[in-house]
Amino acid sequence: MRAAPGRRLPLAALLLFLLLQQPGSSEAWKQHAPRLRLAYKDLLKSNSSRLMLASGDGLDFQALLVDEDRAWLMVGAKNHIFLLHLDHPSREPEKIFWPASREQVEHCQLAGKNVETECANFVRLLQPFNRSHVFACGTGSYQPVCAFIQLGARGKGPGAPPMRLVTHSLESGRGRCPYSPHEPFTGLLVDGELYSGTSSDFMGSSAAFFRTWVHGAEQSYIRTEQNQDHWLHEPAFVGAYAIPDTYNPHDDKVYIFFRETAMEAGQWERRHIHARVARVCKNDVGGKRSLINRWSTFLKARLVCSIPGPQGTETHFDQLEDVFLLRTRDPQNPLIFGLFTVSSGVFSGSAVCVYSMAAVRAAFSGPFAHKEGFDYRWVEYKGRVPYPRPGTCPSETYDPLLQSTKDFPDEVISFMRTHQLMWEPVYPQGRQPVLVRVNVPYRLRRLLVHRLEMESRHYDVLFLGTDEGKILKVGLAGGASRGTEVISLEEISVTKVPSPILDMKLSPKRQELFVSSTHGLLQLSLYRCELYGKTCTDCCLARDPYCTWDSKTCAPHLLTEKRRARCQDVLKSDPLSQCQDTAEGTAATEKLVFGVEKNSTFLECLARSPQTTVRWLVRHGEETGLSEIRNNGHFSVLEQGLLIRQLAREDAGTYECQAVERSFSRPLTRYSLRVIRHEAMEVPPYKRSKGAELGGTHQSPRPRTDPHPGYKGFPRALGAPGTSLDVYCNALRLQERQRQKSWHQKWQHPSPDSKNGRVRRHPQPL
């Protein structure tokens, strides 16, 4: 296989390169901050979510299956299968208790496995078989088992039978479901056949891609070759999808996405994990004299997701975590969204790349990789390729005489035994990721994409699950001609305690997202429009394609009755042209503040959104214009406001704090700063001598070292925005009078007529 052009960076330089790839300014980093950030408790208060299932024992809700037409959600968990009726949230969910047998649990414990987290039946596969049955598989305490689930007769009255496990359909799940509840795997049920990528032994050391029948007496199977590293080498399966190649169903193929240890990686490469896409023909039945019960059309190619850098360097994300197939109007050309990660001792990061089926098919139609030479290196195969081309499905599209893969010539079968790898990799659209997150406190694990068709364009919204129980909502705007713009919308904690997101399912019809973790299942609305703000400007600046301004509130677009919705087009959501409240927002209230010369003063200004950049302007005098304030030794522009380190007389003027977002700016607050001269804060001489005259020759046993005791907190208080000078001066006068009064009474001799005389140690006799 040809390596991606360019050289890899050493780890030390790789971190620097990634940092350089990101915009260095604070304004650019703000674009990565979500518009809305919600903690778990705030999410529950927002009335946009519902906890559907919860478990303190860790039921591991790993598998989800949703039926939008019949409004139910099936959940596979530890020893249980649940069925929830979405139209009746108050109804108790139907439940099947499906544990492993006592003998299986004991055998698992004797093998050294954990009784709580491994020695149980973790249901990991739920696939629809027909309208009345679902095919389910579980780990069976390291003895995989599969069975059919019969759905209850819905709508036939209270006496209708509930969901039940068809016990006579129980059979071994080997080659269909993994032994371990933690092992990555994939399963796809198509036309009564299950395609699964999983381990085939107790130790998990041998993994393969299988096809098995799930019903009937036929027990035939087909799989990848065993103990052949050039077929599969320590694979971790991520996803599988059936995609038609032509209008002839005999050309249909199943595409498999996984990562594996790359055999072709050179010794100079420190990372040997490569992301792969493989494919097989649905009508592949193996060879006649060779490759019996083995795939005879299995081919694979590398998926490249990298950031191009200077001088031919590239930063690769090779750890494929999840894949989502976005169906389009053309069933033969869906879009493939891949979620990748990279991790090392220096940095970690995640990226999302988008691939077209044209690029995938081009790689499989290109040259093969081949081992040859004295050092047995991988090179491009330039010999004669047999006919029909290896990987071709038997159909009349290419050769009417080929009715089955058993009809392939021996030359084709022999070639397929040693040539699974393609030389050309598959590159993403634009040759770079559409989303990159590096050096963040989480790793992306799950990916869903929802496409919104609106007017003459569409928008893709990504829902990303992290390893800490958060859901990121990110919008993609633009296209190939103008580039993709990333719009960070939400970051929501959907778990009470940090735990990885295990599965996610989308319901476009209901506008809901179902998210599962170890301890719970949550139903989440796709939007929280009202939390963006109460004005049209806030709604437009959010640029959420689900939300629009309906002349009163920021409301969901699909629920509004207004024909002309405002700010719903994220590319045209300009408040100046879309909103009528922008003129009102330009009039910020002016606050009068005072500062003392040679003291620091702080003017507070808080942005309404993490994506907003604050800009400070100042005008000295009525005749001068506004000029922008820059960070220097005198001024410090902070996230909370403006700090003037040492106030000078020339700092007096009008200060305006503006919120800047994209090309739109609006004033948030305005201050009129008056500077009090330092000399005015000196205590007058007559006040200093007045105390001495009243006190005679007596001196305080603890003289004050502060020459201005009454003004100790003056600069600090005047530095606070909005402090009234009259209020503070009145407080100072009262404080001074109380101090003088207490000082005078302390040193005044008691009067002989005083009722409260001095207490004597020996009272006089009566």
Image (tube, rainbow, N blue to C red):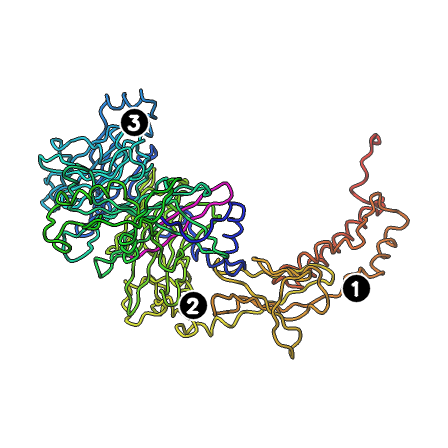
Work out whether mark 1 precedes mark 3 in sequence or the reverse, and give the earlier one: 3
Q: Is residue 70 left or right of residue 655?
A: left
The x and y percentages for residue 226 are 26, 34
Nearest to the observer: residue 726 or residue 755: 726
Q: Quadrant of the C terminus?
A: top right
* Circle 1 residue: 679
Q: CA distance from mark 2 to mark 1?
A: 47 Å
Q: Is residue 704 visible to us here? A: yes
Q: Is residue 599 magenta?
A: no
Q: Assign a secondary structure to mark 3.
A: loop
Disc 2, SS = helix
Toward the viewer: 757 or 16? 16
Q: Which residues are magenta?
A: 339-356
Residue type highlighted by circle 1: Glu
Mark 2 or mark 1: whose residue is earlier in sequence: 2
Q: Is residue 349 magenta?
A: yes
Q: Position of residue 723 (x, y in %)?
A: 63, 61
311 or 130: nearer the viewer: 311
The residue indicated by pointer 3 is 119
Q: Which residue is mark 2?
A: 537
For residue 560, above or below residue 307: below
* Discs 2/3, front: 3
Question: Could you tell me the amino acid type at mark 2?
Answer: Thr
Mark pair 1, 3: CA separation = 81 Å
Residue 119 lies in what quarter of the image? top left
